[in-house]
Structures are given as structure tokens and as C-alpha cells.
Image (cartoon, rainbow, N blue to C red):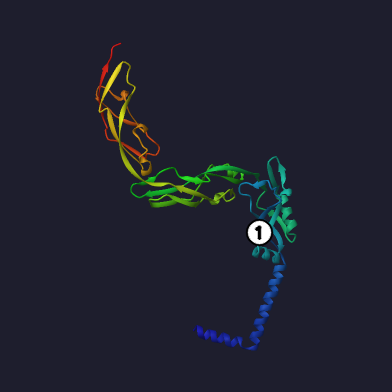
Amino acid sequence: MLRKVSTKIKKLLSRPKASMFLMFLVISFFIWFLITLSDTYVSQLNFKVTYSGIPEEKLVLGSPTNSLEATVQATGFKILTYRLFRQSVNLPYTDFRKQKDSNYMLAVDLESAINRQHNSLVVKRLDLDSLKLTLGENVKKYVPVVSRLLFSFDEDFNLSDSISIEPDSIWIRGPEDIVAKVDRVHTEIKNYKNVHNSISSTIKLSTPDSLNSLEYQTKQVDIKVPVERYSEKVLKLEVKVRNLPENTSIKLYPAMVEIVCKAPISQLKNIKAADFEVVCDFNDANNQISYLIPKIAKKPSLVSSVKLLDQKIEFLTKTTEQ
């Protein structure tokens, strides 16, 4: 069926009169289209807003208006062109009205700017009454760099010292309202698995899109992660008693306790009993409890863990008369 219709249309178009008719139809439509576009119409257009002439020591704060919706009168040609190719309107800083720290333009100022830059249009109405431009100082501030590193260590391995970041603080520069909200800068999240060696690496800083108006001293830092094998050492310590009443002597059983400490192998030989302190608080004793509980009161920073092998200390007291 479709093939028959197609064949008939081709036969009609192949006739000289049909071709002539089609040509006149196209020409007539084109002339009508030109006449229609030459008429004047009222329509809405959207303009991109740009700013110029802002002092170098100033920065635009917040989110300034970046588009204007205007009802305009113009020929169909112009309206079609503006719809196909979006136009912009530039607002010089010198054209803004000043009042204390505020910079603004009224609707009449904006209409004048559009009419001046696009004289083929007549602005009838804008979709806003005024436009405000907030400026601030371009400020600089130093903030610390905070690492976001995750580790899982092989058995008996761990950090042997604190993580080093170089530089450990950087300056940021930008609009004062944004800089004021930033009190630290983070590294990107990095996950290290099955770690058994020290790590030296360069890692990027996290710079979220919400802070893309900031300038950073650097966008990467060097990190050093000291890792070492750990081992255990057993030490014997004398137990000290706190808060013992005056004129009271005490005898502990046992008087010495053993502890197991864990530290880097390279430091293990330097660890001595004098680096630790085990204490019992006599105030914890009462009529129902006949023992004291020892606690670790002091340990070296390089020791990762300490375990008491004796959990209870029995005691006898003797009061001496004055």
C-alpha cells in the first residue's frame, strides 16, 4: 500500500506543473516567514550577567546573580537570534550604587545597561527589583594539614613513631567569608593494607568543589609513616601504695609484680623497669575487699601496650601508735 502511494507521489512530482507549484509554495512560505519575522513582538529573553572593574584587592563574596530574565520588545529576527545565541550584559563596578558596604543596582539601572549594550531591544520589564553585589577582602590564613590515612598491619608490625607531614600547615587565600569557615585541610583518604615497611609518599590534599574559590599554597604533601616489627619484654617492678594513712605500714603479697610490654624491636633493649610505675590506691580497700588492684601509672611513649601479669595484691597493715 505504502509503495503504491509513494509511486503515485513520484509520478506527480515528475510532472512539470507539479514541480513549478512546489517551487512557488516554498518561495511563498519563505516570503511569509520573512514578513512575519520583520514584525515587532514582546517576548522574554535570558541574559548572562558578567561583572567588570572590580578592584584587585576585592573579591566577590557569596553567589552573585549570574542571569537576568527580561521582557523585551524587538523584531522577530532579533528575538530569534537572541534565543539561538544567548547574549550577555556586563555590569561595571563603577555603575553600582554605593551605600556603606553595600553595592547594588536598581531595576532602572539594569534596564539602562541592557538598552545601552543591546540597542535593538527595548526592555519592558525585569524579573527582579534590584541586584546586589557583595565584595570582601582577599585574605590569607595558615591552617594545619590533617591526614586521613588508614592502615592494616601485618602481624607484629605497627607504627614506631608519629606520622610526619611536610608541610604540616599551609596557607590558603580567598574570599574572607569562605576562608573564615576553614580551620584545617585534609589529605585524600588513603588505605594501606598488610603494611610491614615504613612508607614515604606524596599524597594530594582534598579540595572540595565548595572551596574552589580558594588558592592553596600547595595541593599535595609528603608523608612519612615509620613502621617497625614489635616484640615483647617481661619486667619485674616494685609496687607502690598511694594514700596510705599516717602511722600505718603495709606489707604487700607479692611486693613485686611482672609486666609484659610491647615495643619496637630496635627500642626494646633500651626499656628498663625504672621507665614504669605500678601503683595501688589504699583508698580502694575496705572491709569487704582484702586485696588491692595494681595499675600502670607510668610507661614510656614508645611502648604500645603493657599488661600486668598480677591482677591482685594481698596486703597486711600495721598501725603504729604515736
Residue 97 is situated, as x and y percent measured from the top left of the image, at: 72, 45
The one nearer the camera, 276 or 319, is 276
Which kind of residue does numbered mark 1 sit on?
Gln
The residue indicated by pointer 1 is 44
Q: SS for tag 1? A: strand
- At x 32%, y 26%, the residue is 240
The one nearer the camera, 297 or 8, is 297
Q: Is residue 118 above or below residue 161?
A: below
Label 1: few (<14), some (14–19) or many (≥20) C-alpha neighbours in 10 Å: some
Specify whether residue 176 is in view: no
Quadrant position of residue 86 = bottom right
The one nearer the camera, 12 or 223, is 223
Quadrant position of residue 87 = bottom right
Q: Is residue 240 above or below residue 90?
A: above
Q: Is residue 127 left or right of residue 317?
A: right
Task: Work out which residue is located at the far top of the displayed protein and give it.
Answer: 322
Residue 119 is situated, as x and y percent measured from the top left of the image, at: 75, 59
Residue 316 is situated, as x and y percent measured from the top left of the image, at: 24, 22
- At x 64%, y 65%, the residue is 84
